[in-house]
Amino acid sequence: MDRIKYPKNEKGRDFVCGDLHGAYDRLMEFMAHVGFDKEKDRLFSVGDLVDRGPDSVKCLKLLDEPWFFAVRGNHEELMNDFYTGGPYGPYWAQNGGFWGLSFGVRQDPDFFSDLGMEVRDLAKKASELPLMMTVERQDGKFFHVIHAELAAPSPITDEDLDNESIFKDVTMRENMDGSFVLWGRFIFYNAYGKEFTQNQREVDKFRRGAEMHKMGEMFNEKLSHIYSGHTIMRRPTRFKGQTNLDTRAFSSFGEYAEPWTGLTVTEPLTDRFWTAKRDGVFEVEPIVLA
């Protein structure tokens, strides 16, 4: 399943959240803050539900909720490959997968527990998530949700994404780690962990990096806005037609959590952003780089 299209929400609001990475409590705090109505509202996730944070199992179980929708992230790929013997499986532990190792080892009693079977079933479900979701807003416009980036050094349109061959090329083309849609960092790499508030040199460096790979050339008025994660930002960060929502939610727990870390969520219709941090939920402004 590569792409799912969702009709407009006639009853409530739509939100998009950044990489969860086990930060279940941060999501619940955000939902309480905005009065999320599970009967009417919808939440779309950029993937990476698991690893590094405290509650990977709870985040996986969100896949059974009727109001929660997610695309596949690279950590879902790592997890499934570990359980099925795929090529990325050996790298799961070093990328935060220690929490789930026992559920995949037959010699460990956790493998045969009810939870072990449930986790493996959910891992399979996560491996079947789409690479992209396209959602109609209440105003008739659309937005796309992916995990990382598209491999498109020239203009593409929503109509192009309906073409199976073009869609496969811009999502599954390989870069250093794997397919672009799961692993790509050409757009946001030079913004990794930077605030940009007082450093024009860093802004210029970011723009040169994006221009070198021609990644800004895909965006145009016929391509709906893209929400993604994967590469850690200090705040939600926008470059032309794409907004990165990964603000390191998994690091926002404990006494020594860095104050900028948290789970970032946006409402595409209003273009409002919130970050659920250790000390509460705060409305934030995105960093706009172009």
Image (tube, rainbow, N blue to C red):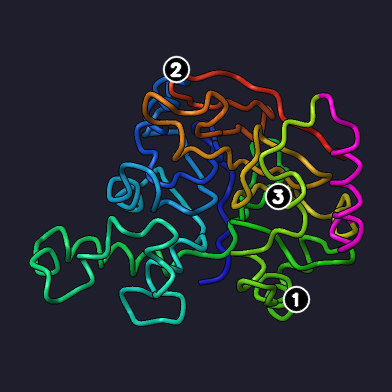
Q: Mark 3 points at which residue?
A: 226
Q: Which SS does the magenta portion mostly show?
A: helix
Q: Which residue corresponds to the image point at 58% horizontal and 37% vertical from the top-left?
A: 247
- Viewer-proximal residue among 179 and 70: 179
Q: Residue 271 shows which numbered tag? A: none
Identify the residue shown where x is 37% and y is 33%.
38
Q: What element carries label 2?
A: loop
Residue type pointed to by label 1: Ile
Nearer the N terminus, badge 2 or badge 1? 1
User: On the image, numbered disc 1 is attached to which residue?
Assistant: 166
In this figure, which residue is indicated by the disc labeled 2? 279
Mark pair 2, 1: CA separation: 44 Å
Q: Which residue is found at the position 86% from the left and 38% from the top?
A: 203
2 or 1: mark nearer the eye: 2
Crowding near the residue tagged with mark 3, few <14, some 14–19, many ≥20 C-alpha atoms within 10 Å = many
* Residue 169 point in image, percent of width and height: 72, 77
Label 1 with label 3: CB-CB less than 8 Å: no
Q: In this view, does 175 lie to the left or right of 46?
A: right
Q: Relative to 234, does residue 281 appear above or below in the rendering?
A: above
Q: What residue type is labelled 3?
A: Ile
| As drawn, 125 above or below 243 | below
Q: Give the amino acid type for the residue marked by disc 2 in the picture.
A: Asp
Looking at the picture, how far across and down is residue 8, in whole percent? 59, 43
